[in-house]
Amino acid sequence: MKQKKKKQGLSRLLEIAGQKKGLLLLAGLLSAGSAGCMLVPYWAVYEILGELLAHGGNIPEADGAAMIRWGWTAFLGLAGGLVLLYAALMASHVAAFRILYGLRVRLSEHIGRLPLGYLTHTSTGAIKKTMEQNIEKVETFIAHTIPDLVNVTATVVVMFLIFFTLDGRMALVCLVVIGMSLFLQFSNFMGRKAREFTRTYFDAQERMSASAVQYVRGMPVVKIFGQSVRSFRRFNAEIEAYKTFALKCCDTYQNGMIAFTVLLNSMVTFLLPAGILLMQGNGESLAAATVWLFFLVMGPGVASPVYKLMFLGGGTREIDEGVERIDRILERKPVPEPACPQTPTRYDVEFRHVTFAYENTEQRTRTEALHDVSFIAPQGRLTALVGPSGSGKSTVANLIPRFWDVTQGEIRIGGIPIRDIGTERLMELVSFVFQDSFLFYDTLYENIAVGSPRATRQQVEDAARAAQCHDFILRLPQGYDTRIGDQGVYLSGGEAQRVCVARAILKNAPILVLDEATAFADAENEQKMQQALRSLIRDKTVIVIAHRLSSILSADQIVVLKEGRVIQCGQHETLAATDGTYKKMWDAYTSAHQWKIGTNQPPKHSSL
């Protein structure tokens, strides 16, 4: 079957706009009507000029009533044009906002279905720019460019119909001047070099946006070491690169822009000699003079819509580049859904000869993270994952909810491969409490309710009590309705983790993954965290990524990973008594807890 060719450029923009074809057709008709009405005052001027020139020797004999009628006609034409233009813009804006809403929802949902690898290899700043600025530029095309394009086209067509009706030679002069100016501008802004410049412009903006996000996130480090934006090398380099590109862009386009502007504004320079020749070759000098004066008035007026057309063309090129980047995200293949989804009835987690590697298709790199990993995390038991940094513990955890698909082998929940479980159902089965707690810029109530959007307020508060965070929430200015970040309200690391635990308790998923959930708790709060976790893990399949070995001494099973392989498996007493990686880690852990800060200097003796 022949693959359908992907639309690009203006055809792709029109395809997006076609989602609200009826509203945009209405906007186009109203805009064209507005253009016609806006030209009525010019025709009125022509009629008034003709009447005045016909009675140039005796102005009082001119038909004053007729000139007044033409004056009112000009006013009504202008008013009608403005009303129709307002109605056209209202219709196009309604269409644009509806299309943008659908496009943002579609893009957000699609990103949510992509493997985590996409988010790992794509900067947050680039995604943010695409979802905000690039989509916003689509609104500019639909709400403004389309009605403006219709308006400008209708204006120019009607004007030249009038021109050729009055005098073909003078009209031809105007057409040649406009044609030459448009040729200069479109060759300047719509060629291959222009496309490359636009692409480079967007790349520079995305890199600068990504570096800005990192700079803001790293502000505590920047401030504590007394640094500035210039010392944050990457951000500074991106700003300098953007400045260099902008200056180069201006230097490249300035000559063409100057030539275009001068030529278009010199319409009268070409009409004056043409008019003189017209007057000399025409016996009816009065009629010829009227036509000539009309061209001198209307000819420069053509420059305004042509200018608008030029800016519409340049803006469309930029919008098109933004749409290409939106399509690039939409073309990414999401994690495939099973044809016949299955639902497990038990919740043990099994890794069967799992091999997995992180792949970066853009840089063509492949980093092996797991190799032939096999173990079972029984239902209702606690399984701990330990190992040196980079051993693959977090990778194992991230593969359970199918953030990536394994390269070889398979992962099963209740005997069913996770590839055969629908993504939505799989997300319901697994809950996470990670070391790096993430809270939304929202109220504490909504942050906890994320775990179960249908939960009642009483259920949310019960989950908070079980997570030992109800009391400190009530001490906040608006209690559960306190918005994090407003009025200087921020949570400590331990408090944020307890909110995340409350979220997981509310979700009540049968499989739970914990990444050292007490990492940020101080000595006073660690006991509260342990109580919260005991409420959370009851009767669940629990997989703990352990950094603090003392927290998993009572684990039913400890899986030791090293360089992406399972090298030991058992309980603490057995592993600590057996030579191997776990014993070395335990000995190092116990030694570290005996270490104290001191000078190691012998005490000084008194000389007395």
Image (cartoon, rainbow, N blue to C red):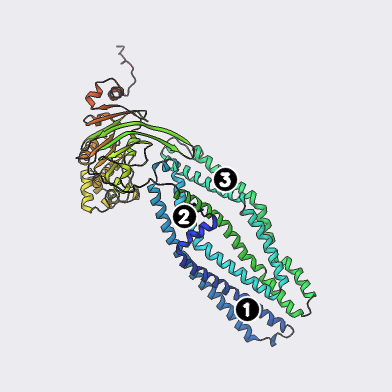
Q: In this view, does 274 lie to the left or right of 468?
A: right
Residue at x 45%, y 53% (from the top left corner):
132
The reply to whether the C-beta atoms of the residues labelled 2 and 3 are less than 8 Å apart is no
Task: Label 2: state its secondary structure.
Answer: helix
Q: Outermost residue, top direction?
A: 608
Q: Which of 555 and 297 is in front in this view?
A: 555
The reply to whether the C-beta atoms of the residues labelled 1 and 2 are less than 8 Å apart is no
Relative to 232, say whether 572 is above or below. Answer: above
Packing grade of label 2 (10 A; few <14, some 14-19, many >=20) is: many
Residue at x 53%, y 52% (from the top left corner):
321
Residue 41 appears in which quarter of the rendering?
bottom right
Q: In which quarter of the image is the C terminus?
A: top left
The amino acid type of the residue labelled 2 equals Ile
Task: Label 3: state its secondary structure.
Answer: helix
Which of label 1 and label 2 is nearer to you?
Answer: 2
Q: Is residue 52 left or right of residue 148?
A: right
Instruction: From the top left corner, tell me how far across and down residue 184 is, in percent.
Output: 67, 57
**Would residue 53 be visible to someone looking at this image?**
yes
Residue at x 63%, y 83% (from the top left corner):
67
Specify which label sits upstream in the sequence, 2 or 3: 2
Which of label 1 and label 3 is nearer to you?
Answer: 1
Name the residue beneath numbered marker 2.
135
The amino acid type of the residue labelled 3 equals Lys
Name the residue beneath numbered marker 3.
243
Q: Residue 44 carries which label?
A: 1
